[in-house]
Image: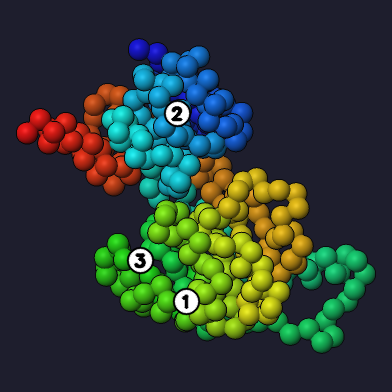
Amino acid sequence: MSKTILVTGPDLDPAAAGLVADRGYRTVHTPAYADSAVIAEFLQQTGAVGIVSRMGRLDAAVMDAAPQLKVISKHGVGVDNIDIQAAADRGIPVLVATGANAVSVAEHAIALLLATVKRVLPLDAGLRAGRWEKPGFSGHEIAGSTLGLMGMGAIAQATGRMAKGLGLTLVGFDPYAPDSTFEALSVTRCTSVEDMLAQSDILSLHCPLSDKTRGLLNTETIELMPKGAYVINTARGGLIDEAALVAAIRSGHLAGAGLDTFAVEPPATDHPFFAVPEIVLTPHIGGVTREAGARVGVDAVRGIFQILDGQPIASERIINRKLLAAAQAEPAAVEK
């Protein structure tokens, strides 16, 4: 068996790389945002038994090119770049580093919120261009506004804790989270997405991207939000209909947005977001801090070795555990 771990991206925290080396394995890195064919070629050349998934899509063709592959470990929690059904069909567990980057991403969500609502970037640009825009300026006080949390996972919870310190009232929607999660943060639980949107002066997205959530924020759902509301997205770009968001800001229904993610990354140079000064943009780096990188990297690598060694691993970290169980049960059902 090859002692190689493939990292789909150019970086891995030294602590995580050291853990790989201590086990007598080596890491091999693909270029940033390599396509599936390049990743498949790396797997064939190296014989890697585990993948730390950072950038690039891992689809069925990639997995078929690597029959030796035993485990895929996401460097974070968003697995929309991994075909988890294809992995389950091939007996490959897909792991996530639950909560390891929550604080860093939450901090970034709050930074985007403040920069957007307080209009920091356009005011800075105006001053540098020689304009003193205090006369006639009217800002917006955040305290007392309502923040809607779409999803109540670890990142949303961390964001909520920080938001409470700013005096925001919290509402949220997550059909999978227990009541205790909402109660611990004094978040009012909404019975539907529509109910939450109608109350959200500021909406912060923290749910995974799936067939059910793709385009969650669109022309119709944006209309449910209060006039002058803001959108913050540190989750996945595909949650938002980007054209609808631009139209809502230009019409004045939304006052602005702070976005760390795009539907396609990196975005095209002529992406319409770049022409809208009310949108604050960052290149999907909410969780890219030294501290989070160390935690996520070590968790991702440690999970790989737990699988390779046949050691127990927390069930919530195996994102396709139900699909794996179903795939394993199918042959028995056919035999009967």
**Disc 1 vs disc 3: Cβ atoms closer than 8 Å?**
no
Residue at figure coordinates x 54%, y 68% from the top left: 218
Q: Which residue is mark 1?
A: 197
* Residue 297 in sight here: no
Foreground disc of the pair 2, 1: 2
Q: Earlier in the sequence, mark 3 or mark 2?
A: 2
The quadrant holding residue 93 is top left
Residue 323, compared with residue 309, is above or below; it is below
Mark number for residue 174?
Answer: 3
Mark number for residue 61?
Answer: 2
Residue 288, image x, y percentages:
57, 45
The quadrant holding residue 313 is top left
Question: In whole angstroms, how far apart are the C-alphas of marks 3 and 2?
Answer: 33 Å
Q: Earlier in the sequence, mark 1 or mark 3?
A: 3
Residue at figure coordinates x 67%, y 58% from the top left: 281
Residue at figure coordinates x 78%, y 68% from the top left: 122
